[in-house]
Amino acid sequence: MFSQPITASCILCHTSLQDEQQPLCLCQYCLDDLPVITHSCPQCGNALKADIHGLCGRCQTHPPIVDKTFSLFHYKPPMNYLIKQLKFNHSILAADLLGKLMAEAIIQQNTTCPEALIATPLHTKRLRQRGYNQAIEIAKPLAKKLNIPLLTDALIRNKHNRPQTECSAKERKTNLRNSFSCASPLPYSCIAIIDDVISTGTTVNEIAKVLKKNGAKTVFAWSCTHS
């Protein structure tokens, strides 16, 4: 469905790009202006004040199932624009850009990489409506850059749930219950879940629960943005 993007203008401000800028489809000015998360809780990914180190208070008292979370950007302009372009306007340019930026940040951090990636799956009904899974499109360049296998059929979404964005905080805790399953036992002990946005962490923790029941020992959550 998608082909390799080629563009001579910035995806955000539409100014002409220099040759070295074209692989990211982003000019240096817009790249420098992106809202990077500079300090966060290593387990849940929530942004922290600079003087707070280690786990946040919530993770110390109620640790999530996910072992480690990495989110690159705050979910605010222009990242919310890019995510919406990806989810609702079929922007493969945004997917390619976000996947490459995540890969570069992970490489720079020299963090432990998982053995495999799994993108948050869509239910077949929503997949037919949208035509593609935006998390998979982000995960493709990420997997290629990091040379890690992307498992596209290992995790199944069993229920056509209400979008989490339409649920209250209380409803989010039960909306996704028993929504995911694995097609077979997993041959990898360390897996990273890939998604476009993490907010409360309910989705990635529900997935982590299923992955750990099916053979994973350690589960990371990697997302483009955190709200």
Image (spheres, rainbow, N blue to C red):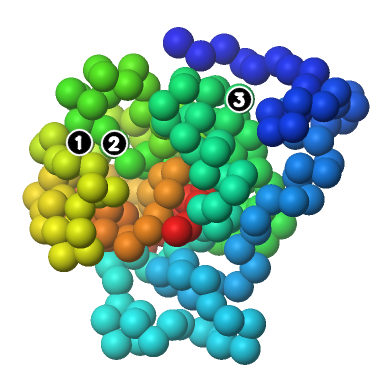
Give the mark nearest the N terminus, 3 or 1.
3
Give the mark nearest the N terminus, 3 or 2.
3
Q: Amino acid at mark 3?
A: Leu
Q: Amino acid at mark 1?
A: Ile
| Above or below: residue 14 compared with residue 160 | above
**Percent x, y of residue 18:** 90, 27
> Residues at badges 1 and 2 in contact (C-beta under 8 Å)?
yes
Using the image as rendered, state which of residue 47 and residue 121 is in the foreground.
Answer: 47
Residue position marked by numbered label 1 in the rendering = 156
Q: Nearer the viewer, mark 1 or mark 2?
A: 2
**Percent x, y of residue 111:** 60, 62
Q: Amino acid at mark 2?
A: Pro
Residue 121 is labelled as: 2
Residue 93 is labelled as: 3
Using the image as rendered, state which of residue 38 and residue 104 is in the foreground.
Answer: 38
Residues packed near mark 1 inside 10 Å, few (<14), some (14 to 19) or many (20 plus): some
Quadrant containing the C terminus in the rendered view? bottom left
Please name the residue shown 9% across and 50% down the image: 178
Element on which disc 2 rests: loop
How many circles with numbers are drawn on the protein? 3
Q: CA distance from mark 1 to mark 2?
A: 6 Å
Element on which disc 1 rests: strand
Residues packed near mark 2 inside 10 Å, few (<14), some (14 to 19) or many (20 plus): many
Q: CA distance from mark 3 to mark 1?
A: 26 Å
